[in-house]
Structures are given as C-alpha cells and as structure tokens.
Image: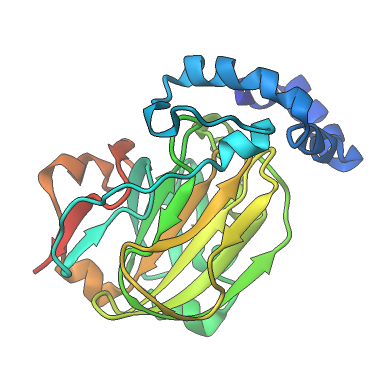
Amino acid sequence: MMKADFFYSNAFGRSLLSILQKTGAFRLSARFLHTKLSRRMIPGVIKKNHIDMAPYEGRTFGSYADFFVRSYKHALPETSPDEFIAPCDSLLTVYPVTEGLELPMKGSLYRLTDVIPDEALARTFHSGLCLVFRLEASDYHHFIWFDSGTLEGTHFIEGQLHSVQPIACAHYPVYRLNRRWWSVLRTETFGTAVQAEIGAMMVGGVSFEKTEGAFTRGEEMGRFELAGSTILVFLNGEVRERLELYEKYRDARDGVSEVKVQMGEALGILK
C-alpha cells in the first residue's frame, strides 16, 4: 500500500488522492483486504511494525482484515477510579479548548462544532480539554471505556478518508473532513464527556459493542477496522482544572509532542 507521504508531500500526490477518493478506488482496495489473497501482506506488516504476535500464537487469519481486528484477553493495569486511563494504545497529544471553542490541532484551527455538530453540547466544553489518541499500524486497534457511566447515543458523520498522520494533518483539517463517530458519555467520575472516533485512509468502519445504555470502565467499547485512526476525548472545563497529568505525559500538552501510551494506562489524576 502507498504511504501517506506520497499523497501529501507534493501537489501531484494530493491531486491523485482527490481522484482516487472520487472514483472509489480505496473502497475497492478495502474489499481486497477482506479476501484470502490479502493474507500475503500479513508477514510483512508484522515485521515492518515489530508487532508482538505472542498473544496470537497458533492462530491463523483468513484475510488482512481478519488480522487487523485480531483480539485477545489481557489484564489492564491496576488504577484508581479518579485516574483518567488511556482508551487505547496510541500516541497522545493534549490541547486546551479556548474560550472561542477553538482547537489549534496538528497545524489546523478547528472549531469544536467541526467535530461535535451540536452547538449547545459543544459549549459545555468551553475552556475544556481535548485528548488526541492517534493509533499507529503497530497498535492494538480495540478501545475501552475510560470510565463507567451511561452512553446517550452514538452519531455517524459520513466524510472523506484522509490519513491521520502528521503530514496529512498539516495539509488538510482531517478531523473536520474525515468520516467520524461521536458519542455523549455521562461518566461517573469525569462528568459529561464526548468521545469521537475518526476514520482514516482505508478504514472500513468502526464496530461498537453498544450504542446506548450503561457501560463499565475498562470494558471494550469498540474497534477500528483496516487502518490506523484517531480517538478524540473532550472533557469539560471543571475537569480540566482538576486533572493533573503525570510527569511522563506533560510533553503531550499543547501539542508539543506525541507521547506513547498503552490501553488502560493511568495518564493523570483528579485533584
């Protein structure tokens, strides 16, 4: 598969990308990844991304898509209820939501309503916090609930399928353009939050364990299919004032750098 650099580093690549998106070529490629022939890609992907296959020893995969959504049971780190935990394996950056409900993320300026198309709901995150979890090819593409609470519904927005790698974000406001799902979470510890799953190039979709009702911290919320993607978590202003990130994650603040995190790992604590 072509790398994101090819499509985003020059005008020719970006023009070709536009044509491919309009012709549905990526959808055709996605279909191929569900076939037996695509199994030939798996050893190369494992080697390139240094994926630990020990948890899957003895298992065979029917296609690349089957390999990508592989799952296994594993114990999460022990944490306290007032610690905010990572919903997935990923690279983390953290951004403040300004008084104007704007987010200066990845070289683009977003309004909160670009991601959450509900003006009244978006305003509840005035002076809040946005945690960006960017999943790479080597990451486990399942994600969990970061707290217990009640899910009020999951909404889908059809969009394009740009890469979510930094080079793509530098040229396109991908979190506004891309296909995405967003959910309102009434959590026990962190108040009302919104979580958004952002689709990426080649992503066929997101599968959720449920779309409404009660949920439990640490249980699986869903999984991405076919390619690396991004999860955004919005927390309100009161939580922002109280949430103290642990020292090892402070470089992630204001988009200074991406910091590696593991699913279920405690990132900070409410003070």
The quarter in which the N terminus is drawn is: top right
Instruction: Please determine whether, in this image, residue 168 is positioned above or below residue 237.
Output: above
Instruction: Please determine whether, in this image, residue 151 is positioned above or below residue 170.
Output: below
Q: Residue furthest front?
A: 58
Q: Is residue 178 something that shows in the picture? A: no
Q: Residue at x 23, y 49 (%)?
A: 265
Identify the image quadrant of residue 17: top right
Q: Residue at x 54, y 72 (%)?
A: 210
The quarter in which the C terminus is drawn is: bottom left
Instruction: Please determine whether, in this image, residue 223 is positioned above or below residue 168.
Output: below
- Colour theme: rainbow
Q: Where does the image place residue 81, in percent across and percent down from the top left? A: 17, 69
Q: Residue furthest right?
A: 23
Q: Where does the image place residue 270, in percent across and percent down from the top left? A: 14, 68
User: 229 and 249: which one is in front?
Assistant: 229
Q: Is residue 66 something that shows in the picture? A: yes
Q: Where does the image place residue 258, in percent across and percent down from the top left? A: 33, 37
Identify the image quadrant of residue 163: top right
- 180 to the left or right of 36: left
Instruction: Please determine whether, in this image, residue 187 is positioned above or below residue 224.
Output: below
Q: Where does the image place residue 20, in percent across and percent down from the top left? A: 84, 33
User: 139 and 269: which one is in front?
Assistant: 139
Give the total of numbered labels: 0
- 265 to the left or right of 1: left
Q: Residue at x 45, y 42 (%)?
A: 134
